[in-house]
Image (cartoon, coloured by chain):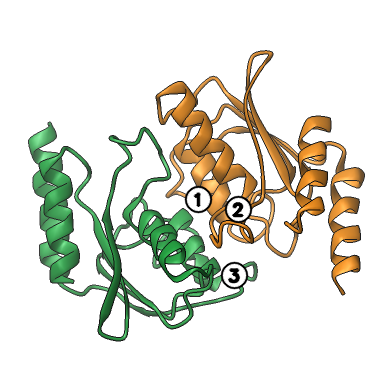
Chain colours: A green, B orange
Amino acid sequence: MIRALTLAQQAAAVGETPIGGIIVRGDVVITSAHNLTESLHDATAHAEMLALRAASKILGTRYLTDCDLYVTLEPCPMCAQAISFSRIRRLIFGAYDPKGGGVEHGPRIYTQPTCHHRPEIIGGVMEHECGQILKDFFAKMR
Amino acid sequence: MIRALTLAQQAAAVGETPIGGIIVRGDVVITSAHNLTESLHDATAHAEMLALRAASKILGTRYLTDCDLYVTLEPCPMCAQAISFSRIRRLIFGAYDPKGGGVEHGPRIYTQPTCHHRPEIIGGVMEHECGQILKDFFAKMR
C-alpha cells in the first residue's frame, strides 16, 4: 500500500486525483497506475482500470485469478465490477468512500446477484494516509 | 440500433460476444465498437467502454454531455457507471439482461446515492433482435 500511496502522490503532482493502485502476483509487482482521467480525457481512466488492463496485457489473459489489487481508495462501482470480471483474488483498499464507493457503499457490487466473482476484500489499510492525501488535494483545489 | 446490431453480428463473426454499441451526437456517429474481451485479453473491453473511450479521444473531452449511446444489451454495472461518469445524455439499449445487467437489474446503478449523473434511459429497443443474436451465439458455443 505504501507503493500505491507513492503513486497517488505522483498523481497529485501532475494534477490528477491522487489515487494509486498496483497489481501483484505473489511477491512480484505486475503493474502500477494512478488516475489519469484529466490527462487522457477519459472518464474511465481510474487507477484500477488502467492497472487491470495493463496487467491483462502483460500476462496475456483477461483472468487475473492469482493476482491481488492494492488501491488507495475504495473502488467505485465501475472498478469494483471490472475487478470482478478480471477475477482478481484479493482486493486491498485504503480509505473508504461513502460518496462514490461501490464495495462497502452505494450498490455494494459484490453482494449483487449479477456479480459472479467476489474477491476477498480487506478495507481500511493505511486508511488515514490514503484519505488524507485526497483531502489535501481537494482542499488545495478550492 | 440497426447499426449497433450490425456491429454485434461482426463481433459474433470473430468469436466475440455479439454486443455492439455506437455513440452519436445529433445526426453524427462519433464512434462504434463491439465487444473485444477475447481478442484484447481484456475483461473490461465491453462495447460501451471501447466506444466511450474512443469518443472521448475523438472529441478531446471526458464529458460526452451532448452524446447518446446505443447498445444492443442492457449495460452491466461497470459500463452503466462509466456511462454516468462520461455524462452521456441518453442511453438507448436493446435486450434486457437479468443475469448481468446493471441498469434495470442487480445494482440498478442510476438509482444509487453514489451515482451523480443519470442519463435518460430507453430500454427494449429492437429487444427481440438484440436478444436473439446472443441466444444464437451461445447456442452455437454449446
Judge whether A46 appears above or below B58 on screen: below
Of circles 2 and 3, which is in front? 3
Query: Quadrant of the rendered structure where residue B17 is?
Result: bottom right
Q: Quadrant of the C terminus of chain B?
A: bottom right
Of circles 1 and 3, which is in front? 3
Q: Mark 1 lies on which chain?
A: B
Kindly indicate whether the residues beneath marks 1 and 3 are on one polypeptide chain: no
Judge whether A4 appears above or below B89 on screen: below
Residue B111 in view: no
Q: At 76% across and 59% down in the image, what residue appears?
A: B15
Task: From the viewer's perspective, tell me whether residue B44 is left or right of residue A3.
Answer: right
Where residue A142 appears, as percent x and y from the top left, is: 12, 31
Marking on residue A115 = 3
The amino acid type found where label 1 is placed reads: Gln
Q: Label 1 vs label 3: CA separation?
A: 17 Å
Which structural element holds mark 2? loop
Instruction: Give the residue number, with chain letter if any, for mark 2.
Output: B108
Where residue A114 appears, as percent x and y from the top left, is: 64, 67
Where residue A46 appears, as percent x and y from the top left, is: 35, 50
Q: At 68% across and 62% down in the image, what residue appears?
A: B100
Task: From the viewer's perspective, tell me whether residue B2 is left or right of residue A27.
Answer: right
The amino acid type found where label 3 is placed reads: Cys
Q: Which of B121 and A116 is in front in this view?
A: A116
Q: Which chain carries label 2?
A: B
Task: From the viewer's perspective, tell me whether residue A32 is left or right of residue A51.
Answer: left
Q: Nearer the viewer, residue B50 or B107?
A: B50
Where residue B105 appears, as percent x and y from the top left, is: 68, 57
Which structural element holds mark 1? loop
Asked if the residue under mark 3 is in contact with the one under mark 1, i.e. CB atoms within 8 Å, the reply is no
Kindly indicate whether the residues beneath marks 1 and 2 are on one polypeptide chain: yes
Instruction: Give the residue number, with chain letter if any, for mark 1.
Output: B112
